[in-house]
Image (cartoon, grey):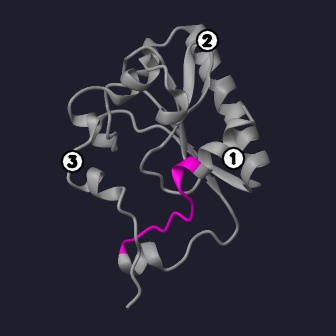
Amino acid sequence: MKELWAPWRMEYILGNNREHDGCFLCEKAAASKDEENYVLYRGEHNFVILNTYPYNAGHLMVTPYRHGGNMDDLTKDEMADHLQIVSKSLGALRKAFEAQGFNIGMNIGKVAGAGLADHLHTHIVPRWEGDTNYMPVIADIKVVPEGLKATYDKLKSHF
């Protein structure tokens, strides 16, 4: 039997992450250590951050600085900035990773699968031809082939 080594997942599995204590997106937005927090880009109303528990290499999130879980609470300027940054993120992922496609989405509300229901965010997951295999279906395991620091370093210059 082959083993997969992903020790960084244990913090998430055991639930010992900051998401349970407060809003980690607000914490990251307020912090000044962008590289340490994997913040890739800061716009006027929104910022881009790597997903710490990615579905694929390059999985990132675009999120408003302002705390809130509903799209209808965003101002026109916040919404325009959000969508422009989603578009900018696609370009960065194409350049850095030669992504061939993307899954883009929001889980609004806990019943819709939002792990953090109170702070709106858009997931962007880059995709490539053949990036799926039997592991998620047979073993309920997703293999992410690159560490967060390496992903951050590849993407940062494209923002």
Q: Which mark is residue 15?
A: 3
Image position, residue 52 (x, y; %): 44, 45
- Rendered view: 43 above or below 146: above
Q: CA distance from mark 2 to mark 3?
A: 32 Å
Please give left or right for residue 22 compared with residue 6 in the image.
left
Assess disc 1: are there few (<14), some (14-19) or many (≥20) residues with their C-alpha within 10 Å of its C-alpha: some
State the image quarter where residue 136 is shown: bottom left
Assess disc 3: are there few (<14), some (14-19) or many (≥20) residues with their C-alpha within 10 Å of its C-alpha: few
Q: From the image, tell me which residue sits under label 2.
A: 44
Please give left or right for residue 122 compared with residue 102 in the image.
left
- The amino acid beneath tag 1 is Lys
| Residue visible at 56% across and 24% down in the picture | 47
Please give left or right for residue 13 compared with residue 120 in the image.
left
> If the image is split into quadrants, where does the N terminus sit?
bottom left
- The amino acid beneath tag 2 is Glu
| Residue visible at 38% across and 33% down in the picture | 108
Instruction: Classify mark 1: helix, strand or loop.
Output: helix
Instruction: Classify mark 3: helix, strand or loop.
Output: loop
Q: Are marks 2 and 3 in contact (CB under 8 Å)?
A: no
Please give left or right for residue 99 compared with residue 83 in the image.
right
Query: Is 55 contained in the magenta span?
Result: no
The residue closer to the viewer here, 101 or 72, is 101
